[in-house]
Amino acid sequence: MKLLRSLASICLLAAAALSVPTQEKRVHHQADLSDRAHDDSHGFQYDHEAFLGKEEAKTFDQLTPEESKDKLAMIVDRIDADKDGYISHTELHHWIKHRQRRYIEENVNKHWKDYDKNQDGKIGWEEYKNTTYGFYLGEEFDDVEDKATYRSMLTRDERRFKTADRDGDGIATREEFTAFLHPEEFDYMKDLVVQETVEDIDTNGDGKININEYIGDMFSPESGEKEPDWVQTERKHFHEFRDTNKDGYLDNAEVAHWVLPGEVDHADNEAKHLIHETDTDKDQKITKKEILANWNIFVGSQVTNYGEDLTKRHDEL
């Protein structure tokens, strides 16, 4: 389990400038199916976002159980590509991957219109830099309280932008801008993903991650707070699985193995999990009836008591 998947957003640019997309979330392995931790015993929120996508999940959080079931039935019809009345693992896997891709596309589209100021279908580094930092750049961040943080953010953004800009022309196409915002999705960006991860966790600046830095990135106890069991499990994972050469640190290669697990397909695992949880007759495929009987696994959210605590709202799929 990983309690903290993202860095705190640095909200210093205020209303005068846009927040920095690359600072919104540290990149860890693939684009996650959900921001929630996946716990099979209490995994409704993870399944909720993995199946619907993060934005669609917010819509379902506003619905009553009856409305959720009606919309879920419509989605099931779309997942059943061969219209045989069953949802196979392949169909469910394809659907979850589709939701992942759509989330990325929507995220890129949202930022694209903010940065492509001249609407030429490209985003230059200067265009991005001036839109993001322009309010303060003239004085080299002299009016900003935390100058070092801003300069570090600008340097990091420029490095990531130039890495994503494969042809080195200083201008990002839509694909290159997607690599800039979601480097975990592109093979040629993976060294950068590892580098950024090390930089974020390596608090003493020695270029590697020790056990205290590893745990500290996930869990910061309040005064007198007892360390929960999952943290003890993570300590064990660090020593037994992460630190493969047993030198007490994670180097770049070990971090790559951790955050870029290669052939692990989270969408595939989630599809298997959902079928296992809802396939009552154990025929390795699920019907609309089985899905609707377990509707809370697919669309329920514990935060909203599975929709019952919120007012009704009708949105289009």
Image (spheres, rainbow, N blue to C red):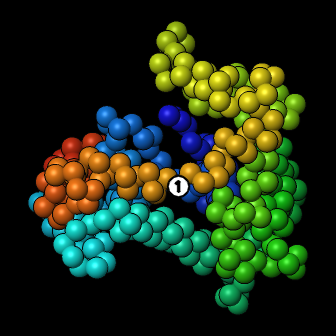
Residue 85, given in percent of the width and then of the height, sits at: 19, 72
Q: In terms of depth relative to the viewer, which is nearer, 129 or 210?
A: 210
Q: Residue at x 77, y 68 (%)?
A: 164
- Residue 256, located in which quarter of the rendered image? top right
Quarter residue 206 falls in: top right
Q: Is residue 40 above or below residue 55?
A: above
> 215 or 285: nearer the eye?
285
Q: Is residue 54 left or right of residue 288?
A: right
Residue lying at 60% horizontally and 54% vertically, measured from the top left: 263
In the rendering, at what x and y percent does residue 196 appear?
A: 76, 48
Residue sitting nearer the eye, 316 or 53: 53
Question: Quick check: can you spot residue 312?
Answer: no
**Quadrant that contains the C terminus:** bottom left
Q: Which residue is mark 1?
A: 265
Determine the residue positioned at 38% across, 66% down: 90
Residue 80 sits above or below residue 96 on the image? below
Q: Would you say residue 223 is visible in this rendering? A: yes
Residue at 54% over, 13% down? 223
- The amino acid type of the residue labelled 1 equals Asp
Where, by quadrant of the figure, is residue 283 drawn? Answer: bottom left
**In the rendered view, would you say 261 is above or below 157?**
above
